[in-house]
Image: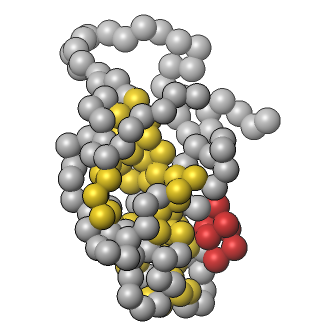
């Protein structure tokens, strides 16, 4: 397993440094840095601060995903499904949580609200062409490969 040092800055004294739940967890838990419980109405989205900023190494991206328990048991997940944190961003990580349920849900101070995974990426160099290589699939779109 490869590791990278991620410099982190607490922007608030009560901010919690991300933690891994187990030795083999891919995602590090991000915590709500709020003073009071926040209620999220059904179908509402609220930005939740984490109180931290990161220095993600060049060549890496931070991807913020839902926590499975929060999403499946309470219907709370990031509004944009996956947040992309570029290596040159130095602002506070803010998590746009959306309540997909039919009842108000509460986020408590220091609650684990999302998880971040750091992954290397490659940039594409776009080269215009008149033709693309042919494949068996060609232009078949959504559902074109059949059911299993």
Quadrant of the image occupied by residue 6: top left
- Identify which residue is drawn at 62% across, 33% down: 144
Q: Position of residue 59 (x, y in %)?
A: 31, 29
Q: How many marks?
A: 0
Q: Residue furthest front?
A: 13
**Residue 111 shown left or right of residue 83 in the figure:** right
> Which residue does the image show at 42% across and 8% down from the upper left?
133
Farthest residue toward the right?
A: 148
68, above or below 34, in the image = above
Pick whichever, 121 or 146, lies toward us.
121
Q: Is residue 96 visible?
A: no
Nearest the eye: 70 or 23: 23
The reply to whether residue 14 is visible in this rendering is: yes
Relative image position of residue 88 (x, y in whole percent): 20, 43
Image coordinates for residue 113, horizontal then vertical, percent: 51, 69
Q: Nearer the viewer, residue 28 or 8?
A: 8
Colour setup of the view: secondary structure
Q: Is residue 59 left or right of residue 40?
A: left
Q: Residue at x 79, y 35 (%)?
A: 148
- Left or right, 144 with reference to 8: right
Q: Quadrant of residue 57?
A: top left
Residue in the image at 29% along x and 22% along y? 124
Q: Taking 73 as reference, is 115 left or right?
A: left
Looking at the image, residue 5 lies above or below residue 121 = below
Q: Can you give x and y, in whole percent of width and height, for residue 28 in the image?
A: 52, 52
Quadrant of the image for the N terminus? top right
Above or below, 37 against 17 in this view is below
């Amino acid at each position: 397993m490869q590791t990278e040092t991620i410099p982190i800055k607490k922007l608030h004294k009560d901010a919690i440094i991300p933690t891994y739940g187990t030795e083999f967890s891919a995602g590090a838990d991000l915590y709500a840095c709020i003073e009071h419980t926040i209620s999220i109405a059904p179908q509402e989205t609220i930005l939740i601060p984490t109180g931290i900023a990161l220095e993600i190494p060049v060549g890496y991206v931070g991807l913020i995903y839902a926590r499975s328990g929060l999403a499946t048991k309470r219907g709370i997940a990031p509004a944009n499904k996956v947040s992309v944190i570029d290596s040159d961003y130095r602002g506070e990580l803010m998590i746009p949580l959306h309540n997909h349920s039919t009842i108000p849900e509460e986020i408590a101070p220091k609650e684990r609200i999302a998880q971040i995974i750091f992954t290397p990426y490659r940039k594409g160099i776009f080269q215009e062409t008149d033709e693309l290589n042919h494949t068996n699939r060609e232009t078949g779109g959504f559902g074109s490969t059949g059911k299993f």
